Amino acid sequence: MKEIILNNGWIHYKTGCSCNASPWYFSNSLHPDYTIIIRGTFFAIKKSGLEISKGNIDSFQSKLTQYGLISEN
């Protein structure tokens, strides 16, 4: 999952507490209102601090495409 967003201009800007399985937080200057959080095989997408989607690796790429956060390549 990390490779998909890193290849689309997202930048890892912090890692959360290890007590929560060390979630990784990503931002993108083209989508300043959005944050993507990856924790193991699960993800969450937040817009302006509100969670708008979450799931596992199976739906990750389709959700990112649905919200226009990555290219469809």
Image (spheres, grey):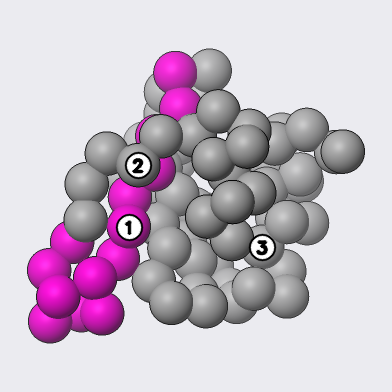
Picture residue at 39% right of the left edge, 71% below the top: 39
User: Circles 1 and 3: CB distance less than 8 Å?
Assistant: no
Q: Is residue 49 visible?
A: yes
Pointer 2: what residue?
Answer: 12
How far apart marks 1 and 3 lie (CA) works out to 15 Å
Circles 2 and 1: CB distance less than 8 Å?
yes
Report helix, strand or loop for mark 2.
Answer: strand
Mark number displayed over residue 24: 1
Residue 60 bears which disc, if any? 3
> Label 2 vs label 1: CA separation?
7 Å
Counting from the top left corner in percent of width and height, residue 20 is at 20, 79
Residue 10: x, y in percent? 49, 34
Taking 58 as reference, is 35 above or below it? above
Q: Is residue 35 left or right of residue 15?
A: right
Task: From the image, state whether disc 1 or disc 3 is nearer to you.
Answer: 1
The quadrant of the picture occupied by the C terminus is: top right
Q: Do labels 2 and 3 touch, CB within 8 Å?
A: no
Say whether residue 50 is visible. no
State the extent of the magenta-drawn residues as a range.
Answer: 16-29
**23 in magenta:** yes
**Mark 1: few/some/many CA within 10 Å (<14, 14-19, 20+):** some
Q: Is residue 28 left or right of residue 16?
A: right
- The image shows residue 3 at horizontal and vertical percentages of 59, 51
User: In the figure, 56 relative to 25: above or below?
Assistant: below
**Label 2 neighbourhood size at 10 Å, few (<14), some (14-19), many (20+)?**
some
Classify residue 25 as left or right of residue 20.
right
Which residue corresponds to the image point at 30% horizontal and 65% vertical from the top-left? 23
- Residue 33 placed where, x, y %? 42, 29
